[in-house]
Amino acid sequence: MNFHEYQAKQLFADYGIAVPKGIVARTPDEAVAAAKQIPGDLWVVKAQIHAGGRGKAGGVKLAKSHDEVHAIAKTLLGTKMATYQTAGVELPIDSVLVCEGTDIDKELYLSVLVDRDSRAITFIASAEGGMDIEQVAQEKPEAIHTLNVDFVEGLQAYQCRDLGFAMGLNAKQTNQLSVIMTGLYKLFNEKDLALVELNPLAILTDGNLAVLDGKINSDDNASFRHKDLVEMRDVRQEDPTEVKASQYDLNYVTMDGNIGCMVNGAGLAMATMDVISLNGGSPANFLDVGGGANKEKVTEAFKLILSSDKVKAIFVNIFGGIVRCDMIAEGIIAAVKEVGVKVPVIVRLEGTNVEEGKAMLRDSGLAITPADDINDGAKKAVAAASAA
């Protein structure tokens, strides 16, 4: 689950990480009221969407008067924005964050994530932060510093100091970095996060560090432990189909192809998409219906797949282990009838009672084509989609 910047900064503050004063607003008048509560004569008005790159896309603007705050908020609110991180998808701007203006001397970068190679929580830092951090990583990999934290020992003070000095910080700034890293490490663990990113973590002209922007992703699998995080969810920032899928405990990701996929098991789902691609096709989605592929789940899965008018064929690839193949076939037949599927459906079943399941599909009288194996099913799906 992703979070808005203002929510991330709220969590930072809860864990002792100092952030510049900022107030979220949902109307231009609220933005002006927020600016009046923030001292100074310079404010930053920032569009709140679940994506980075807002500055380059025109979503971060400076205001030198309350009238400018009002005008900027009016320009942003109620519109949509795409950045280089949204893959062309425009996200709605329902709120803006009004922050106090700061004088920046240098922009740094700091993030926390789980490194699968080292199987450790890892800090990634650079003295060259800002909007072009991806370019820095490509062109100057030596400017990127990595710190793997031992899961038994935890984050040590000397590691924070080493990282600070490696980034060229002075003693005072290194001590401030240590406080920030300690708070982030605790936040990351206690809230079961997947990513924390500070970009920029800035050195101000007064020599102090300041967290000017923050991005947080949490692990959806741990949501049941964190009701406070679930309450922060903004479904308007998410794909509507994926939101609906989550309501039925379906793992769904929208893609750009024209062959709908319904599979049980994430590994098999990825293999199915690979085989479709190898046969010249293009998957329209990733969809894992899980081990308990009952009629209700299968029906909702068909509805989700067919919510896209790009889908020209559907490939159902189910391994009947927990649920028998004949029961799966019964669910598929009932779902096809209920939903009124009008595109070709290719079904590959394997597992317990597979022959009974295939016979039920053949005798259903519906436009359902059985497949012998995953390769046969992929070829038939690609051919059906091409002929549509």
Image (tube, rainbow, N blue to C red):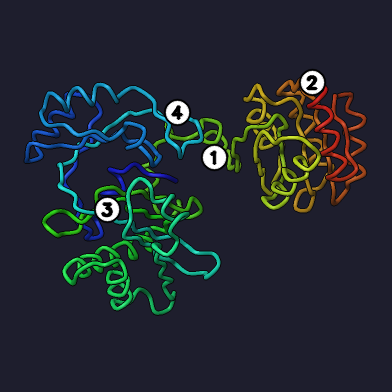
Q: Decide which of 213, 137 is in the foreground and name it.
A: 137
Residue at 56% from the left image edge and 31% from the top image edge: 241
The mark that comes first in sequence, 1 or 4, is: 4
Identify the residue under disc 3: 107
Identify the residue under disc 4: 90
What separation in Å lies between label 2 and label 4 (alpha carbons)? 30 Å
Quadrant location of residue 80? top left
The mark that comes first in sequence, 3 or 2, is: 3
Q: Decide which of 47, 58 is in the foreground and name it.
A: 58
Identify the residue under disc 2: 388
What separation in Å lies between label 3 and label 2 (alpha carbons)? 53 Å
The mark that comes first in sequence, 1 or 3, is: 3
What separation in Å lies between label 1 and label 3 (alpha carbons)? 38 Å
Identify the residue under disc 1: 246
Q: Which element type, helix, strand or loop, lies under badge 1?
A: helix
Quadrant location of residue 331? top right
Q: Residue furthest front?
A: 139
Residue at 40% from the left image edge and 45% from the top image edge: 230
Image height of 99 relative to 186, above or below: above
The mark that comes first in sequence, 2 or 4, is: 4
Q: Amino acid at mark 4?
A: Glu
Quadrant location of residue 225? bottom left
Mark 3 crowd level (few <14, some 14–19, many ≥20, 10 Å Cα): many
Between marks 1 and 3 in the image, the one whose residue lies nearer the viewer: 3
